[in-house]
Image (spheres, rainbow, N blue to C red):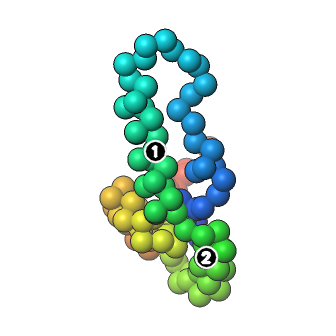
Amino acid sequence: MFISEPALTKTPFIENIRAGRREITDNPYEESAKKFIDNVKQAMVSLAQDPAEVAAQIVEAAESTDPDRLRFQPSIFSQQAAEAVFKDPTGLNMPPPPKYLPK
């Protein structure tokens, strides 16, 4: 068993990101907000993986991953994100579960 952490996958979600629906008269942040949302969308599209590619990598991991490995990141982006957050992004060096004393 392992945890798959694919990060960004190309889906309609990215295309449907909106800044908001409320109209504000003379909004000084309108242009900045639009640029921000456009930049986020562009970054997400450039980093996102094709769903079929993610699925194939997950199947490959399920068939061949070291049974002691807990975490699997199928993209370079998700690997880099995991390395930035986790001390052990693979989960290979997990401490043993705590032993609880019976009551």
Where residue 67 is drawn, which disc sits there?
Answer: none
Residue denoted by label 2: 53
Quadrant holding the C terminus: top right
Q: Amino acid at mark 1?
A: Asp
Work out whether residue 14 or residue 54 is closer to the camera in this orientation and state it. 14
Label 1 secondary element: helix
Question: x, y (%) of residue 77?
Answer: 42, 65
Residue type highlighted by circle 2: Glu
98 vs 34, nearest the viewer: 34
- Residue in the picture at 62% in, 84% down: 60
The quarter of the rendered structure image containing the N terminus is: bottom right
**Dot 2: element:** helix
Q: Percent from the top left, x then y, of residue 4?
A: 58, 67
Q: Is residue 100 above or below residue 58?
A: above
Q: What residue is pinned by disc 1?
A: 38
Q: In the drawing, does residue 87 fall left or right of residue 42?
A: left
